[in-house]
Image: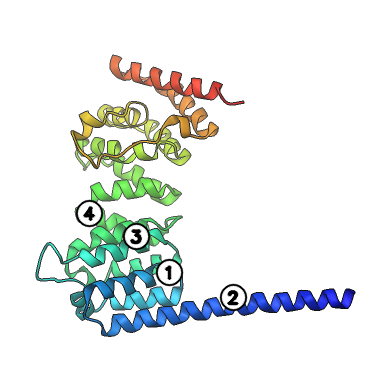
Amino acid sequence: MHAVRVAMLAAAGLMVSWSCANRGDAQNSSDFDSVRVLETSRDRDTLEKAAVALASSGDPQSIARLGGFLTRAEFLARLDDLRRPSDKTRHLQRLFMALAEHPNAATERLCLGLASDSIFLSDDDRRIYLLPALAAVKPMSEATVRVFRQANAEGYYNLNVTLLARNGSPKALALFEEMIRDRDVPVSRRVDALHTSIPPNRADPAILDCADRLLKTPLESEVATGVIESVFDYQSRRWFGPSRSAPVPPAWEDAPKTVLQRVLALATQVRGRSLSPELAAAVSETADRVQRILNGYR
């Protein structure tokens, strides 16, 4: 009986290995077909579909091949109609959305290569899509930080600050804090950056720690107020007007217990500051709400 059981287990193992190998072969075949499409097709929808398949594959070799195409002027011209401003990045955008949805070391290498490629950057609008795909990779590397610091110097401050906060890893937040402390950037711009970047991530412990660190540094009073109200006093209408794309903060009711405890600790800290009556009331209201939610935990 023991010999029979061993034989059955061995056969099952072979079947699993064969199944995995078949799936791998199927993936390789599919990726090969996608590469062939990128080499030959002139239909933009077909090219997009093949490029998205490679971007989503998770296979380092397939993603590297995709990166090679994106450094070719003739391919970029086949992918999008570069003569029409409204269409010049239409398909490229969806390709990079797929990269951002499937981040890994290979997508980071692809984006880092494109960030210094003169052909890809011959239209600077392409960076609008490259940067989110690069920022989707966690944790952020020092090489990526250099790309974002350079992009800051070239007019991408507003985009970058939201991407860095969303990434939330240590190197990303170190650059984020540097950007908020940068007195060469107008105060109003930094306050707007805080209003945009902190609220949608306010339930991330790393963002709360980031806010804590910022408030312990010598910020201008308006910037410090921007940090506090971004956590405790979200005001979509006043900050963004009737915008449908305004960032939406997560409900405190959905936050983990440890996050709520951090919010209360931060509230205790900021109550010792000189706040306007309106902001002081908002901090107290949020702290009371968070305490009620905590009281409901068992």
Query: Badge 3, how many Cα within 10 Å: few under 14, some, many 20+?
Result: many
* Residue 33, position as x, y percentages in the image: 38, 82
Query: Badge 1, how many Cα within 10 Å: few under 14, some, many 20+?
Result: many
- Measured in 3D between alpha carbons, the distance from the residue under mark 3 to the one under mark 2, in whole angstroms, is 29 Å
Secondary element at image label 4: helix
Q: Earlier in the sequence, mark 3 or mark 4?
A: 3
Q: Earlier in the sequence, mark 4 or mark 2?
A: 2
- Measured in 3D between alpha carbons, the distance from the residue under mark 1 to the one under mark 4, in whole angstroms, is 26 Å
Considering every residue shown, the one lying at the far top of the view is 277
The residue depicted at 37 percent of the width and 71 percent of the height is 53
* Residue 14, position as x, y percentages in the image: 69, 79
* Residue under label 1: 106
* Residue under label 2: 20
Say if residue 252 shows up in the picture: yes
Q: Earlier in the sequence, mark 3 or mark 2?
A: 2
Q: Amino acid at mark 4?
A: Ala
Foreground residue among 232 and 46: 46
- Measured in 3D between alpha carbons, the distance from the residue under mark 4 to the one under mark 2, in whole angstroms, is 47 Å
Q: Quadrant of residue 68?
A: bottom left
The residue depicted at 20 percent of the width and 64 percent of the height is 90
Q: Quadrant of residue 131?
A: bottom left
Query: Badge 2, how many Cα within 10 Å: few under 14, some, many 20+?
Result: few
Foreground residue among 5 and 215: 5
Q: Earlier in the sequence, mark 1 or mark 4?
A: 1
* Residue under label 4: 153
* Residue under label 3: 133
Q: Amino acid at mark 2?
A: Cys
Vertical placement of residue 39 versus 8, above or below: below
* Residue 268, position as x, y percentages in the image: 45, 21
- Measured in 3D between alpha carbons, the distance from the residue under mark 1 to the one under mark 3, in whole angstroms, is 11 Å
Query: Badge 4, how many Cα within 10 Å: few under 14, some, many 20+?
Result: few
Vertical placement of residue 62 versus 176, above or below: below
